[in-house]
Image (spheres, rainbow, N blue to C red):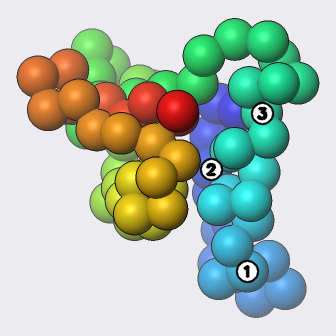
């Protein structure tokens, strides 16, 4: 997944889709899954506050961890 954005589309807004989808990505792609940092090397690579909320919910559910030094979240 490269980008999470619902563009305010009401039928999919606040339905928990990223929370459900992110944990099943790793077995499908066979690779580790991590967020972008808040401030990337370009405007195309960065984590925005709504994504922080998703990742924080995954951390609270013990499905992810945050690496403060790298400023990225990792799926467990």
Q: Which mark is residue 25?
A: 3
> Which comes sooner in the sequence, label 2 or label 1?
2
The percent position of residue 8, horizontal first and vertical second, equals 65, 78
Residue at the (40%, 63%) spot, across then down:
60
Q: Which mark is residue 15?
A: 1
Q: CA distance from mark 2 to mark 3?
A: 14 Å
Q: Horizontally, is 41 left or right of 61 in the view? A: left
Residue at the (20%, 20%) spot, across then down:
70
Q: Residues within 10 Å of mark 1 (few under 14, many from 20)?
A: few
> Which comes sooner in the sequence, label 2 or label 3?
2
Q: Quadrant of residue 17?
A: bottom right
**What residue did someone put label 2 on?**
4
Residue at the (69%, 11%) spot, across then down:
31
Split into 4 quadrants, where in the image is the N terminus? top right
Q: Residues within 10 Å of mark 3 (few under 14, many from 20)?
A: some
Q: CA distance from mark 2 to mark 1?
A: 13 Å
Name above or below for residue 53 compared with residue 28: below
Q: CA distance from mark 3 to mark 1?
A: 18 Å
Mark 3 lies on a secondary structure that is: helix
Front residue of this view, candidates 16 and 10: 16
Front residue of this view, candidates 33 and 60: 60
The percent position of residue 3, horizontal first and vertical second, equals 62, 40
> Which comes sooner in the sequence, label 3 or label 1?
1
Q: Horizontally, is 76 left or right of 41 in the view? A: right
The percent position of residue 41, horizontal first and vertical second, equals 27, 14
Mark 1 lies on a secondary structure that is: loop
């Amino acid at each position: 997944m490269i980008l999470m954005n619902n563009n305010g589309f009401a039928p999919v807004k606040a339905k928990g889709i990223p929370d459900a989808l992110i944990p099943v990505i790793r077995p499908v792609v066979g690779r580790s899954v991590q967020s972008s940092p808040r401030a990337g090397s370009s405007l195309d690579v960065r984590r925005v506050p709504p994504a922080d909320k998703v990742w924080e919910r995954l951390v609270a559910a013990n499905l992810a961890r945050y690496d403060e030094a790298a400023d990225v979240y990792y799926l467990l």
